[in-house]
Amino acid sequence: MTGLQVIRLDHVSFQLKEKHDFEWLKCLGEVFCVFDEQDSGNICFGIEKGGVKKFVKYAGAKTVEYSGKPEDAIARLKRSISLYENLNHPHLVNLIECFDVENGYVSVFEWVNGECLHSPGAFPPPHKYNHPDSPFYRFKQLPVEYRLESIKRIFEFHAHVEKMNYVAVDFYDGSILYDFKNHMTKICDIDLYMEKPFKNNMGRLWGSSRFMSPEEFKLGAEIDEKTNVFNMGSIAFGLLGGERDHSFLKWDAGQELYEVALKAVEEDRSLRYSSVEELLIAWSSFSGN
């Protein structure tokens, strides 16, 4: 791609499709890292001020991977604020503040000492799966009990999402932050979650096809608890098995949990668990936590 503009802020540099004013960032602190791989239209920064780190998400710039309009990205980011407020939970990143700037919109979160399990810029496939520095690869080398605890937290948060009358949209391994030092899991990027009732109004919804149910590809289909059960089962196969390969040979956590995960990813909705809460109960009865 030609004609890209190099932007330099403090200790980082990145590219945009055109120049953009980031003067507003100076009052928040010093930029020490940038996350510019998203196709959502957002660009994110790690900033530090007075020894306190924060995570800044911004919409308004023409990022390299985004093909849409900046104003649409701004609208989505503004809409997401109520999601972080309504779905506030110990396993979710904590929103601190949000505000308009001249050419965009900003949301600021507490900094999490974790690594994203999906980093396509640094570790695109196949490196994601086999490079010793890849967060996903390192996670898959952890003892099963650590991975089971991580999955439990993911299920617990989405049972909470259900109870609050929402459904997950675009939840995938890029929404999972893992702290390898303290073995803690946090969930981020719930910007596209929807309040029920919600129907598929796109044909192919936002998300990674590695974790999406059949109804997320069908225009007019109901997106509900059973959709999220499929999503959670797919995540379990991603973190404990062969991702799209649902064979027992690639599964690390025993026959009982394998059967639970397999029921969750049934193509036929009527054969799945009725809710993430029901899935969590079945999962907990065999996981030992």
Image (cartoon, grey):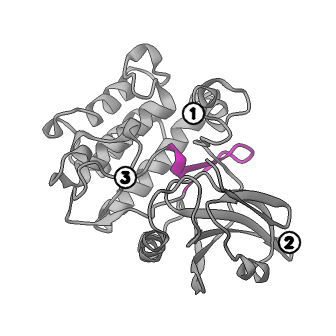
Disc 2 residue type?
Gly
Residue 79 image offset from top left, x and y in percent: 41, 75
Q: Give the range drawn in magenta.
A: 173-187
Viewer can see residue 283: no
Residue 27 image offset from top left, x and y in percent: 77, 83
Q: Mark 3, residues whose alpha carbon is within 10 Å: few (<14), some, or many (≥20)? A: some
Disc 1 residue type?
Glu
Q: Which mark is residue 40?
A: none
Element under disc 1: helix
Question: Going 37% across and 23% down the picture, which residue do you hit?
Answer: 246
As measured in the structure, the alpha-carbon distance from the residue carrying label 3 to the one carrying label 2 is 36 Å
Q: Residue 145 carries which label?
A: 1
Which residue in the protein does label 2 denote?
51
Q: Looking at the image, which is closer to me, 178 or 82?
A: 82
Name which quarter of the figure residue 150 lies in. top right
Viewer can see residue 140: yes
Q: Eyeballing the image, is 224 above or below 106? A: above
Q: Mark 1, residues whose alpha carbon is within 10 Å: few (<14), some, or many (≥20)? A: few
Q: Tell whether 74 sits left or right of 53.
A: left
Question: Going 40% across and 40% down the picture, which residue do you hit?
Answer: 284
Q: Mark 2, residues whose alpha carbon is within 10 Å: few (<14), some, or many (≥20)? A: few
Q: Eyeballing the image, is 110 above or below 121? A: below
Disc 3 residue type?
Trp
Residue 244 image offset from top left, x and y in percent: 39, 27
In the image as oriented, which residue stretches furthest toward the front? 3
Which residue in the protein does label 3 denote?
206
Residue 30 image offset from top left, x and y in percent: 82, 71
- In the image, is residue 181 part of the stretch drawn in magenta? yes
- In the image, is residue 270 part of the stretch drawn in magenta? no
Element under disc 3: loop
Which of pointers 3 and 2 lies earlier in the amino acid sequence? 2
- The answer to whether the residue labelled 3 contacts the one labelled 2, judged by CB atoms less than 8 Å apart, is no
